[in-house]
């Protein structure tokens, strides 16, 4: 009898323990980019650690080297991701449409960029990440600018050139573009200061829309003045 029980036990089929399903490479990549975006935005490139990024992403430390090559490779991809998120905005793409007049391009780009400051359009870490990069630039900046920002910069520069009648490479043209960009960046980077100086400035969609009109009107008034002086001596 005991022999029979032994043989029955041996014949019982044991279901093997289920192994955890491996995460897809794309899922791991996306989680690393999102986690790294937050860490780099909080600490900057130099102070951020791969260990903390992987802990937040729930990934193995080796995943960074395997997926991105190294820390700089991950950082560069995070910057690219942030810029691509901005470029995919419908309003920005519409502003860059070749059928628009020069004035429409400037108004559209200013409005699209300012609207990206509204909390619900883009995560806050995108702005803070660029603040760190601008104050402590890394070797990634050049590559990312050429891949993402140059198209917008050149489109605005050509629009300014068309309004003033000056060549795109003229000093006044470049300074004018810098001034337009500077007014937008002021609201991007000075938000904490503005909250103390102007508590009523909530940067709601309606308020951002009015700010966009002000920046565009302010800039276009100067550009048209330069154009008038050039045409009439």
Image (cartoon, rainbow, N blue to C red):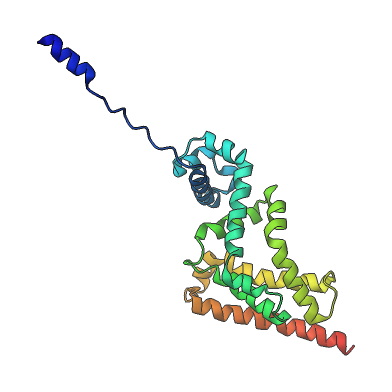
Of the 4 image quadrants, the one containing the N terminus is top left
Front-most of residues 142 and 184? 142
Q: Where is residue 96, by image quadrant?
A: bottom right
Residue 8: where, in percent of width, then height?
A: 18, 17
Front-most of residues 178 and 153? 153
Front-most of residues 87 and 221? 87
Horizontal side of residue 230 vs 62, given as left or right: right
Residue most extreme to the right: 233
Residue 227: where, in percent of width, then height?
A: 81, 84
Horizontal side of residue 224 vs 30, given as left or right: right
Of the 4 image quadrants, the one containing the C terminus is bottom right
Horizontal side of residue 163 vs 25, given as left or right: right
Residue most extreme to the left: 1
Rendered position, 11 above or below 125: above
Q: Residue at x 65, y 79 (%)?
A: 107
Q: Residue at x 19, y 14 (%)?
A: 7
Observer able to see residue 2: yes
């Amino acid at each position: 009898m005991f022999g029979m029980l032994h043989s029955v036990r041996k014949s019982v089929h044991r279901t093997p323990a289920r192994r955890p399903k491996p995460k897809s490479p794309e899922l791991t990549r996306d989680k690393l980019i999102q986690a790294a975006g937050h860490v780099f935005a909080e600490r900057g490139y130099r102070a951020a650690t791969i260990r903390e990024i992987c802990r937040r992403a729930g990934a193995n430390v080796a995943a960074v080297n395997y997926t991105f090559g190294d820390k700089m490779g991950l950082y560069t991809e995070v910057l690219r991701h942030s810029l691509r998120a901005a470029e995919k905005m419908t309003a920005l793409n519409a502003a860059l449409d070749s059928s628009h007049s020069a004035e429409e391009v400037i108004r559209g780009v200013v409005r699209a960029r300012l609207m990206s400051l509204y909390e619900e359009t883009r995560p806050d870490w995108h702005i803070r990440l660029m603040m760190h990069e601008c104050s402590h630039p890394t070797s990634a900046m050049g590559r990312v600018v050429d891949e993402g920002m140059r198209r917008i910069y050149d489109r605005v520069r050509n629009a300014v050139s068309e309004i003033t009648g000056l060549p795109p490479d003229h000093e006044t043209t470049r300074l004018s573009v810098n001034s337009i960009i500077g007014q937008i960046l002021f609201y991007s980077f000075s938000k904490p200061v503005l909250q103390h100086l102007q508590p009523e400035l909530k940067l709601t969609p309606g308020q951002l829309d009015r700010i966009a009109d002000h920046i565009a009107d302010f800039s276009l008034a100067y550009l048209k003045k330069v154009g008038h002086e050039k045409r009439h001596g």
